[in-house]
Image (cartoon, rainbow, N blue to C red):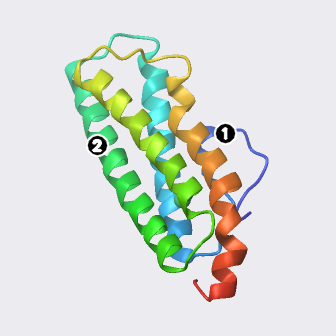
Amino acid sequence: MFGLKGSDVLQSQHCLLKNVGVSEFNKQHLRLASYAVEFSQIVEELSTREPEASDWKHVDALFSRISLFVAVHFREEEEVMRSQGYPEFEAHKKLHDQFVNELAKVQSQINNRNIKFKGKLTDLLWGWLYHHINEVDYQYRDFFMEKGVK
Ligand SMILES: [Fe+2]
Ligand SMILES: [Fe+2]
């Protein structure tokens, strides 16, 4: 772990992420976490009122930024896993693919303007990322360290 721990303030949640041992991936995780926090905030706000045109613009821009950066991050992680012969590569990639599918579903709900800004959507990104980084990504830490990947 690095940074603060134990705060339940949304803005501090990204500090609860574990250090996965590869500095570029730690940086990418923080960036993803800040997008996830921004997404949770807008969802929470729109759970109390009807979205206006400017809200849709914000949601569209944010969600495409998220999808693009998730794709970049997954591609880079998978590339290192593959090139280093990480034994859990296939299983890990499957989890990435499932999340990408999940994001595509949300994207089409956003595109069709039939998304519900409440319930599990608030925590969709942060919940998945938090679990994946700390429980799944963290598992490659020792393997990459032994291989000298930093
Ligand atoms: Fe990751
Ligand atoms: Fe991952």
Near-viewer residue (35 or 140): 140
Amino acid type for the residue under numbered disc 1: Val
Picture coordinates of residue 133, whole percent (x, y) = 62, 55
Q: Is residue 80 above or below residue 119?
A: below
Residue 129 location in percent, x, y?
57, 46
Proximity of marks 2 and 1: CB atoms separated by less than 8 Å: no
Name, please, the residue furthest toward the bottom: 148
Query: Secondary structure under badge 1?
Result: loop
What is the x, y in percent for residue 15? 66, 55
The residue drawn where x is 50% and y is 32% is 40
Q: Is residue 82 visible?
A: yes
Tally the marks.
2
- Label ID, residue 106: none
> Quick check: 147 above or below 82?
below
Q: Is mark 2 within 8 Å of ligand 1?
A: no
Q: Is residue 133 left or right of residue 76?
A: right
Classify residue 137 by image quadrant: bottom right
Residue bearing the label numbered 2: 64
Quarter in which the C terminus is drawn = bottom right
Residue located 23% across and 18% down the image: 112
Q: Amino acid at mark 2?
A: Ser
Nearest to N terminus: mark 2 or mark 1: 1
What residue is rendered at 31% in x and 21% in y?
109
Question: On the image, numbered disc 1 is attached to which residue?
Answer: 9
